[in-house]
Image (tube, grey):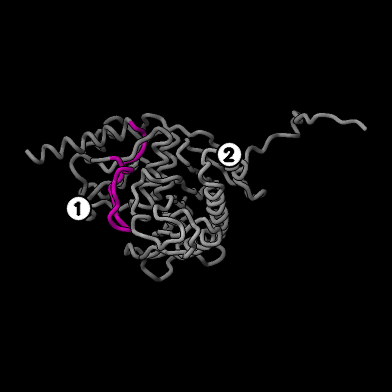
């Protein structure tokens, strides 16, 4: 009987398909010895739900699940049918996994207590960001934050478990449903991106150790609100135009952020007269993207302080957001502060 050591085939017929998300998570599990596998399983649960949402968005035009649902969510925004579907899918996946004790969702008025006494994690999630773009076939996304609960397992959920600063996140990520579907996440040890291979039903590592450029030539902002901006934002955007930067604004937060993360740029959703506290939600939008940005060498601020240092005081708290390449965010923040000082003189 002959026994030969295994040698990978190097022929052109045996091209590598890459590292799957599951394998990558297992390889990195040693980074969290305290987790005993629960965090790894939680990430898999989110990945599974995202595959289902990906399927639903891909067939939205054929199955009459596009368009408005006919109800208004807690934000005062008209719910789309896929908002409701995505919320159900992620709720179901997170409740059945057993690792989560409570969920904060954009689509729910209150904290959802899963009554899982052994759950060690709290998840804050925007199940479907930019869902109004579905009907016109524009990229949309999912954003999630993961926190360790503070109170002992087995005890009732308390406010202290929910109202944690973004700096307390143990993991955060987003899923981009676009020309290809990508899952990008961090556990505080860098940022990695995975592209979904539909025929195999697997996410494969496609963007290892993402590093954001320190600067860029893209600015992303809704210029329709220009008359309502603070003076500092107006001057910064004028400076971008003088430098012949490219204006790129999709209207889906995940898509705009993802592009600027990879290519270099800044995304701005500042305070306005209509929304003096900003419009984006702190717990399940800004915090997650801020952690990813910082882990990739980028920066996130509300124009006055680091996003991850903001202490939340309400479930659906809003915040201004300046996020992207560090040099660009620092410059925009500096101009805002200069104008604020001038207004006090």
- Where residue 185 appears, as percent x and y from the top left, is 49, 43
Residue 113 painted magenta: no
**What residue is at 41 percent from the left and 59 percent from the top?**
105
- Which residue is at the front of the view, 99 or 155? 155
Q: Earlier in the sequence, mark 2 or mark 1?
A: 2
Q: Which stretch is magenta?
A: 306-326
Q: Which residue is mark 2?
A: 205
Query: Compared with residue 325, is residue 89 higher up or lower down, i.e. above or below?
Result: below
Q: Residue pushed farthest right?
A: 1
Q: CA distance from mark 2 to mark 1?
A: 43 Å
90 on left or right of 26:
left
- Where residue 286 appears, as percent x and y from the top left, is 35, 47
Residue 319 painted magenta: yes
Query: Mark on residue 297?
Result: none
Question: Callout 2: few (<14), some (14-19), or many (20+) C-alpha neighbours within 10 Å?
Answer: many
Whether residue 125 is visible here, answered yes or no, is no
Quadrant assignment, res 327? top left
Quadrant assignment, res 163? bottom left
**What residue is at 84 percent from the left and 29 percent from the top?**
4
235 on left or right of 207:
left
Question: Callout 1: few (<14), some (14-19), or many (20+) C-alpha neighbours within 10 Å?
Answer: few
Whether residue 309 is visible here, answered yes or no, is yes
Query: Mark on residue 273?
Result: 1
């Amino acid at each position: 009987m002959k026994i030969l050591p295994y040698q990978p085939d190097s022929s052109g017929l045996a091209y590598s398909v890459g590292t799957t998300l599951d394998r990558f998570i297992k390889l990195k599990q040693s980074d969290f010895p305290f987790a005993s596998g629960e965090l790894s399983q939680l990430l898999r649960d989110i990945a599974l739900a995202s595959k289902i949402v990906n399927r639903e968005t891909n067939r939205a035009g054929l199955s009459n699940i596009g368009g408005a649902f006919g109800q208004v969510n807690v934000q005062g925004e008209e719910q789309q049918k896929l908002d409701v579907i995505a919320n159900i899918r992620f709720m179901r996946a997170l409740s059945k996994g057993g690792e989560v004790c409570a969920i904060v969702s954009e689509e729910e008025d209150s904290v959802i207590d899963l009554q899982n006494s052994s759950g060690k994690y709290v998840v804050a999630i925007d199940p479907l960001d930019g869902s109004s773009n579905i009907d016109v076939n524009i990229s949309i996304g999912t954003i999630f934050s993961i926190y360790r609960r503070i109170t002992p397992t087995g005890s009732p959920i308390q406010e202290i478990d929910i109202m944690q600063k973004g700096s307390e996140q143990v993991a955060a990520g987003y899923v981009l449903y676009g020309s290809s579907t990508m899952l990008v996440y961090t556990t505080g040890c860098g940022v990695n991106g995975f592209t979904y291979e539909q025929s195999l039903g697997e996410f494969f590592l496609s963007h290892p150790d993402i590093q954001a450029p320190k600067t860029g030539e893209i600015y992303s902002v809704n210029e329709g609100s220009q008359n309502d901006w603070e003076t500092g934002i107006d001057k910064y955007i004028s400076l971008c135009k003088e430098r012949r930067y490219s204006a790129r604004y999709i209207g889906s937060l995940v898509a705009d952020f993802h592009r600027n993360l990879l290519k270099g740029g800044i995304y701005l959703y500042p305070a306005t007269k209509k929304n003096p506290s900003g419009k984006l939600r702190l717990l399940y939008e800004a915090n997650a993207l801020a952690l990813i940005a910082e882990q990739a060498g980028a920066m996130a601020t509300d124009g006055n302080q680091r996003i991850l240092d903001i202490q939340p005081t309400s479930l659906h708290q809003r915040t201004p957001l300046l996020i992207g390449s560090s040099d660009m965010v620092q410059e925009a923040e500096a101009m805002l502060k200069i104008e604020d000082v001038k207004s006090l003189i």
